[in-house]
Image (cartoon, coloured by chain):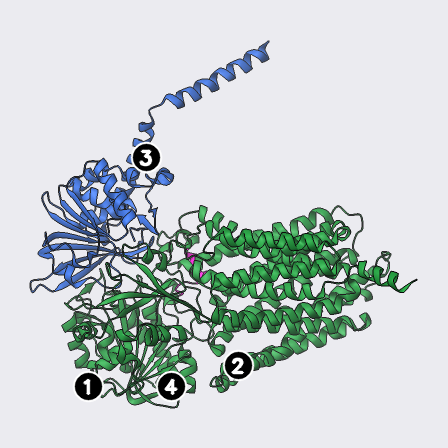
Amino acid sequence: MPKTLFVSAAGFFLTWVFACAAIADPDSSEEAAKRHLWADVESQIDSLSLELGFDSLSPAVRESLREVPRVQFIPRDRRHLAHENRPVPIGFGQTISQPLIVALMTELLDIQPGDRVFELGTGSGYQAAVLAELGAEVHSVEIIPELAERARATLDRLGYENVHTRIGDGYFGWPEVAPFDAIVVTAAGDHIPPPLLRQLKPDGRMVIPVGGRYAAQKLVLVTLDEQGRARTREILPVTFVPLTGDR
Amino acid sequence: MPLYHRALSSDLVPRAPLASVALISATALAYEVLLTRIFAIVHWHHLIAIAISLALLGYGASGTFLVLAGNRLQRHLGVAYVVNAIGFAASAVVCVVLAQDVNLDPEALAWEPSEIARLAVAFLVLMVPFFAAANCIGMALWHFQREIPRLYGLDLLGAGIGALLILLGLSRLSPDTLLLTCMAAGLIAALLGARALRWHLGATALTSAAVAVAVMTWSPQLVVPSAHKDLSRALAVHGASLDSTMHGVAGSVSVVRNAAIPPRSAPGLSLQSSAFPKQEHAVFVNGDRIGALADYSDEAATDYLADLLSALPYVLPINIERVAVLNVGTGLRVQQALQYGARQVVAVEPNPQLREVLCTHYRPLHQALCDPTAVQWQVQSARTFIARSEERFDLISLAVDAEPSGLDAMAVGYASTTEAMSLYLSRLRPMGLLSLVGPTRMPPRLSLRLLNTARQALLASGIDSPSDHIAMLRGWQRFILVVSPAPLGAARLEAIRRFASTLAFDLIWLPDIEAAEVNQFQRLSAPLFYEEAVQMMRGSASISGGFSRSRRQPVTDDRPFPALSARWSQIVGALAAGSPAVWAQVDTGWLVSVAILGVVTVAALVLIIVPLAFVQLGRRQRPPPGASVRTLIYFALIGGGFLMMEIAWIQQLQLFLGHPVYATTVVLAAFLAFAGLGSLWSQTRSVESTHRRLVLAVVAIVVLGLLYLLLLPDWLAMLAERPIGQRILVTGVMLAPLAFAMGTPFPIALSMLGRYAPMLTPWAWGINGCVSVIAAASTPLVASELGFSGVMLIALTTYVLLPWVGLTKLRNDPRVATVPRPASSR
């Protein structure tokens, strides 16, 4: 009798646990994962303050990163990786950037509401969405049609009307709406397109991640000096190499 | 017996499948070499050692399988042989396609554990064809013991012919066609086997035909670059189309055209430039992008050439009339030389398909490059050309490329070693210049290694103050290193500063450099390049240790890994210290090699040793005391030594033969053939003199090995100017005595075991196979640490130890004499 009682109790307990797990709010675990991810990013930025020149994200950038659902920009079969601080392949040999890199690039671009931004390489559309969340008017060009269409669909679904995308040659920027306050080049190739530099406003900022598809060697910030000559500053060299992507 | 009865009965008796074994052996070797090309196209590197390791794993696993299932297979020899031959044929194609479906992304290996599982799956899948081929050869040898010499001889002959045929095949046919040819050869071998073994020829023919049709209709394209390769990514771009593809021994060259989104390339273009190239065609070798074809028919389209970092030598106050451009690629530096008024340019390119692309298919784009009065083309490696050339140049220009992720860290390159730079310097006119351009990485790696290599070359050339002869600049992700046999002097230094300032390039090193003038345009948080260059130029005594020291090690012919920036000792040390920055220093290519070694080791233990242990340990027969340990050590030493020696030769002879495919094919064929002959010869000798013969063989191996180690570089340099056919012949002749001697210790000990401890024979094969597999995969890693001379010395040491193991003295051991001989021993 006690044995039967024990088995019944154990069965009830297990059923109860499974039932609780089944009816638990799925968002709560996702929210926790998101919180953990961005806390991790902030902690890394703090530890890199010497190289970066700043020790935390601005409130606006922090808010925009938390608002944009990264998971929506990742193919379904890899969405379990959405809240990890790592790049995720999105097909065609491309990746969605590591959250840390997106955070740093966004911070370095110093976006103000109403800024006009050009992005060379839409990829998943995630970076464009983060910039749009800050109030920028984003013009993004993608060279792979399937990626461009998928990104457009995601951006539309999430209501990012201030992101303008097109498929085509980004080498000449987007002359109709140039000059830009900020430019993000995620597909630089072996040189910075000269026409693109000419579309940067005198006090504008251009950010380029450089390195392999996953292992970025550095982030390069391009600015123009008083004579309009381009100068670069390499961020994150040597001591820390995060994993990045979007090319 | 009536005559017709005798004829009938002889027709029904199975004969040894001699022709079939020869054909399978030829195809297996050809397939092994073909895999190196497939690896290069699908992934990132030809991975010679891995292809060899795969083949050995298949052969080793087959040995264990035959030990376990041999008796059953003996009873059904016909069907077993034919099934394995057809299996070999089909799997040769199917496994390549399946391995690609695994979708391995080696660049993600550092952070994605599932990539190791993918690597293991791809590796095991590709082992299957070798397993099936080895089953056929093994079953034939086992069943027709009286025919062993003939079977063995034909096996070796087949391998030799296979090596020759794959060289011809690679020079003309696509990898897809070659794979299907391998399948066809395997199916013919099945038919020949069925005929010899008297097993249903009709059924075999029908099955073969069905397999051929099924495989050929299964996949339209068999070898496809992975989605991560440059070629795949270029073809995914809107408006891109594959314009042409050519196949040759040096690689498969593809040209992608895209007028909508041109694949522009201008490496080292100044940030101040407003000019840009006019290009619509990107060029790929084995799926890796090497550049773009510029349209120089429009004069304005050449303006950007003056704004490239590589234009530096032409703005210096020297008269540049005669230029040698090494590793031409897509011809950018040749056009640059012509643009600046060079009267005669020698364009040196080892890949004939690239010359064909430039000067046949796309000639209208750049007529000047193909004008024989201005440009003299030389289709050979940079080292071969420079060794043969007696001319003196005003400028020798070389581009050294490396993957940004370090995926090519284990790639061997002889064009930028200390020895190569010494040669280049000797071919310059007194005021001439050697110019090297390449990519910069963070932390500084290739750039500073080459700076130190140039310094060492100047010292080796008798120049006491090398720092006065070197200038180095960096621009957007590129560097240029300029070296002169004469001190650079004030006028040239002033011109360099003017060039750098105008185009916003940063100074890394000038003889009179000041700290205040560095790190101006492409700013780093600290002037790392300059600081390390200063340390280096002051001499090695002040160079700090750790990764920095490793990154600055000069590249030599003995350790020709220009893109490798970290060594075992530093990585292990940093990991042990828990340094978070360690992964920033580790090259992906090195990491992949370590992962492959891990996979190979586990696979060899699981597929070769574990099944053997499972069965053998359960058997009652016990070996004589001490024999087990001796067997283990002896056959492990042979397995390790043989493979280390073989792979070290393959890597080193790339310099002499000019290309990895030639080196792989010739060394594999020579080692197989001559070691096999040595083995056959040894089997004919009496067992009484085994130890004496072993000692003689070891003495021969060590003497020849040391002789080659000390004298070979000079000998080969003298012969470098010979045509490739003669160089292949010389290689074969040179390797013959060494391989012959290396082929004898294995059968010597095996015959001893057969007589005194036959229960250990399967172990001998298994241990030898297992260690061979691991040694093949580990040799490149060992070479990156100790150099190829270190690998050779380790291999020679393993042979020196053989007589000391005492296995060949087994019959003199009193404990052995007391063990009753099994009935099966001879």
Is mark 4 in CB contact (under 8 Å) with mark 1?
no
Q: Which residue is mark 2?
A: B725
Instruction: Give the spatial CA distance, label 4 vs label 1.
Output: 24 Å
Three-letter amino acid code at the position of disc 3? Ala
Instruction: Give the spatial CA distance, label 2 vs label 1.
Output: 44 Å
Instruction: Give the spatial CA distance, label 3 vs label 1.
Output: 63 Å
Q: Secondary structure at mark 2?
A: helix
- Badge 2: few (under 14), some or many (20 or more) residues near its Cα, within 10 Å? few
Q: Quadrant of the N terminus of chain B?
A: bottom right
Nearer the observer, B699 or B321: B321
| Label ID, residue A33 | 3
Q: Quadrant of the C terminus of chain B?
A: bottom right
Query: What x and y, as percent, mark residue B447?
Result: 32, 69
Q: Tell me the mark number nearer the camera, choosing from 4 and 1.
A: 1
Q: Which residue is mark 1?
A: B317
Query: Who's blue, chain-wise?
Result: A
| Label ID, residue B433 | none
Going from the N terminus, do you reach mark 2 or mark 1 first? 1
Three-letter amino acid code at the position of disc 1? Pro
- Badge 3: few (under 14), some or many (20 or more) residues near its Cα, within 10 Å? some
**Which range is magenta?**
B564-574
Instruction: Give the spatial CA distance, label 4 vs label 2.
Output: 32 Å
Q: Secondary structure at mark 1?
A: loop
Q: Which residue is mark 4?
A: B461
Q: Secondary structure at mark 4?
A: loop
Instruction: Give the spatial CA distance, label 2 vs label 3.
Output: 64 Å
Identify the residue at image location x=41%, y=76%: B350
